[in-house]
C-alpha cells in the first residue's frame, strides 16, 4: 500500500460515488485512528455496489482523491447529478449537500472566467435541478443551512439565494416551471458583480461612497450581460435588474415604486438580504436568524414585501416542504 501526503489529496463524500466498472481516479482511504492515507483502489479498477456497501457498513463516509483530479471529479459529479438527486435511498439532506457541492464548484469555475453563454447554460441546468429537488423533498431549514457555506463569495451567495428563493417562492404558491425559472434567475442575480473591481467584494472595511456607487452598478451590469440571452425570461432579467429596488422607491439602480418591481425580484431581495446578513463578511461575523430577521423586519413595507417576509419567517422556523 502506498501513502500520500494529505496536502495532495482532497476528501470526497463516499455517497457521491456510483458503482462503476472502472474508477477514474486513485481512491485513498483514511483508516480509523490514523493520519496516514492509504491507497484503497487504483484507477481503472472496478468499484462495485458491494464495495460501496462494505465501506458504508464499516462507517466510512469519505474517500480521498488526488488534488489534480478535482476538475475531473467535478465533471463526474455534474454528469451524475440527476441520478443522484433522484436516488431516494439516500437521505435528502445528503443529496442536498452534494447538489450544493457540485453547484458551488461549477459556479466557482464559471464565474472566474465569465463566458456568459456557458454560465447561463450551467445555471439553467442547476436551476432545474435545485427547483425540482426542493419542490419534491422535505428537509429541515436548520439542516439545509448546516450543509450550505456562508462565506459570501459570489458563487456561494448565488447558490444560497437560489435555494432560498425556491423555498420562499414555493411557500408563496409558485410551482413547476416558475420555480425553475426563479431558481435560475436567483443563480444569476449578482452576475454583474463579475464586472466590478473584484477587490471591492472582499474589502475589509465598509465601502466608501465612490466604491458604493461602483458596487451599485452591478444590477445594471448584470442585466446588460444577460439581456440578449434568448433562454432567459423577462421575470428572470428583472431578478437581476431589480433585486436592490425597495418598495418605497429608495432602492437602486432606478428607484422604482412598489408596483413596478417584479414579484420575482421582491422574492430575490428578501432572501438576498437574509443570506448577506447570515453570512460571514470581511467586516463582521454572521448574524443568527433571529437577529437577521429582526433587522429585515424593520424594513417591512419600506424595502420588502410584508407578506413575503412573514412567509419567510414562518419557513425558516419549520420544515421545508412540509
Ligand atoms: Fe446584488
Image (tube, rainbow, N blue to C red):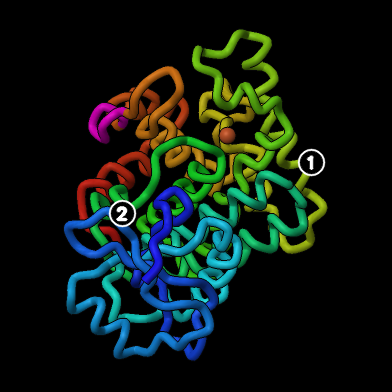
Q: Nearer the viewer, residue 195 or 315?
A: 195
Q: Is residue 166 visible?
A: no
Give whichever of discs 1 and 2 has the lower sequence position.
Answer: 2
The residue positioned farthest toward the front in the image shown? 1
Whether 163 is drawn above or below 294: the answer is below
Is there a contact, CB below 8 Å, between mark 1 and mark 2? no
Q: Quadrant of residue 118?
A: bottom right
The location of residue 205, given as percent across then percent down, is: 50, 12
Q: Indicate which disc residue 164 carries.
A: none
* Badge 2 element: helix
Whether 322 is drawn above or below 7: the answer is below
Q: Indicate which disc residue 144 carries.
A: 2
Give the residue pinned by disc 1: 224
The location of residue 289, given as percent across then percent down, is: 26, 35
Q: Residue at x 23, y 76 (%)?
A: 56
Q: Quadrant of the N terminus?
A: bottom left
Which stretch appears magenta?
287-292
Cα separation, mark 1 vs mark 2, equals 33 Å
Residue 151 within the magenta-colored segment of the rendering = no
Amino acid at each position: 500500500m502506498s501513502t500520500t501526503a494529505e496536502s495532495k489529496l482532497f476528501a470526497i463524500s463516499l455517497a457521491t460515488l456510483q458503482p462503476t466498472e472502472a474508477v477514474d481516479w486513485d481512491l485513498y482511504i483514511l483508516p480509523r485512528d490514523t493520519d496516514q492515507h492509504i491507497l484503497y483502489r487504483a484507477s481503472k479498477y472496478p468499484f462495485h455496489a458491494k464495495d460501496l456497501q462494505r465501506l458504508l457498513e464499516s462507517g466510512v463516509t469519505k474517500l480521498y482523491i488526488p488534488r489534480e483530479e478535482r476538475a475531473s471529479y467535478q465533471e463526474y459529479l455534474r454528469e451524475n447529478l440527476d441520478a443522484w438527486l433522484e436516488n431516494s435511498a439516500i437521505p435528502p439532506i445528503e443529496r442536498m449537500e452534494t447538489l450544493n457541492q457540485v453547484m458551488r464548484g461549477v459556479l466557482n469555475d464559471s464565474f472566474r472566467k465569465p463566458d456568459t453563454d456557458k454560465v447561463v447554460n450551467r445555471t439553467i441546468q442547476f436551476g432545474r435541478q435545485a427547483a425540482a429537488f426542493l419542490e419534491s423533498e422535505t428537509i429541515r431549514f436548520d439542516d439545509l443551512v448546516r450543509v450550505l457555506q456562508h462565506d459570501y463569495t459570489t458563487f456561494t451567495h448565488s447558490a444560497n439565494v437560489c435555494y432560498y428563493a425556491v423555498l420562499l417562492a414555493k411557500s408563496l404558491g409558485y410551482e413547476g416551471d416558475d420555480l425553475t425559472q426563479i431558481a435560475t434567475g436567483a443563480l444569476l442575480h449578482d452576475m454583474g458583480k463579475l464586472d466590478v473591481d473584484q477587490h471591492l467584494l472582499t474589502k475589509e472595511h465598509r465601502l466608501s461612497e465612490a466604491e458604493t456607487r461602483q458596487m451599485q452598478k452591478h444590477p445594471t451590469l448584470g442585466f446588460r450581460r444577460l439581456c440578449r440571452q434568448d433562454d432567459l425570461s423577462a421575470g428572470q432579467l428583472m431578478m437581476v435588474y431589480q433585486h436592490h429596488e425597495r418598495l418605497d422607491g429608495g432602492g437602486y439602480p432606478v428607484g422604482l415604486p412598489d408596483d413596478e418591481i417584479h414579484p420575482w425580484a421582491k422574492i430575490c431581495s428578501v432572501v438576498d438580504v437574509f443570506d448577506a446578513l447570515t453570512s460571514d463578511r470581511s467586516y463582521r461575523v454572521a448574524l443568527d436568524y433571529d437577529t437577521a430577521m429582526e433587522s429585515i423586519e424593520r424594513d417591512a413595507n419600506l424595502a420588502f414585501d410584508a407578506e413575503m417576509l412573514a412567509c419567510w419567517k414562518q419557513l425558516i422556523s419549520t420544515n421545508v416542504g412540509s
